[in-house]
Image (cartoon, grey):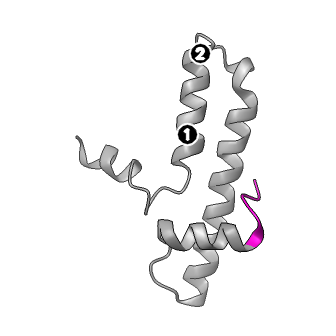
């Protein structure tokens, strides 16, 4: 597997794998009619925005790594009662 593909599929670096997979699955199911999958695209976009803002906050606070690990993200989501997007 290509290095970039592995990075995109890594749970610790990409918090939106589930949303990405869901949008691809929707596109496959609807013969790539984007209008049928707009809700999935919006959820993915909101996921990326949320975790990007979280990464910027952590960077400003001097926390490393910039992106929380998969376990830390799950703890954060559980603390706020689920996904905010």
Spatial CA span between label 2 and label 1: 14 Å
Taking the image as drawn, is residue 54 in sight?
yes
Q: Residue 78 appears in which quarter of the rendering?
A: bottom right
Question: Is-magenta flag for residue 81?
Answer: yes
For the stretch drawn in magenta, the main secondary structure is loop
Evaluate if marks 2 and 1 touch, with contact meaning CB atoms under 8 Å apart: no
Could you tell me residue 65's position as x and y percent? Answer: 45, 78
Viewed as shown, does residue 80 lie left or right of 7?
right
Q: Residue 20 appears in which quarter of the rendering?
A: top right
Taking the image as drawn, is residue 68 in sight?
no
Q: Secondary structure at mark 1?
A: helix
* Quarter in which the N terminus is drawn: top left
Numbered disc in front, either 2 or 1: 2
Q: Circle 2 sits on which residue?
A: 29
Could you tell me residue 81's position as x and y percent? Answer: 77, 66
Residue pictured at 60% horizontal, 42% vertical: 19
Magenta region, residue range = 80-85
Q: In the figure, 60 relative to 70: above or below?
A: below
Question: Is-magenta flag for residue 58?
Answer: no
Disc ID at residue 4: none
Q: Secondary structure at mark 2?
A: helix
Q: In the figure, 65 relative to 19: above or below?
A: below
Which is more toward the observer, 85 or 66?
85
Residue pictured at 61% horizontal, 73% vertical: 75
Q: Earlier in the sequence, mark 2 or mark 1?
A: 1
Residue pictured at 62% horizontal, 53% vertical: 48
Neighbour class for label 2 at 10 Å: few (<14), some, many (≥20)? few
Could you tell me residue 2's position as x and y percent? Answer: 24, 42
Could you tell me residue 69's position as x and y percent? Answer: 47, 70
Disc ID at residue 20: 1
């Amino acid at each position: 597997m290509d290095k970039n593909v592995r990075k995109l599929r890594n749970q610790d670096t990409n918090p939106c794998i589930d949303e990405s997979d869901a949008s691809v699955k929707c596109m496959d199911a609807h013969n790539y009619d984007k209008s049928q999958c707009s809700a999935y695209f919006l959820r993915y976009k909101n996921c990326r925005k949320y975790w990007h803002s979280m990464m910027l906050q952590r960077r400003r606070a001097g926390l490393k790594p910039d992106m929380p690990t998969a376990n830390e993200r799950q703890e954060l989501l559980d603390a706020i009662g689920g996904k905010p997007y």
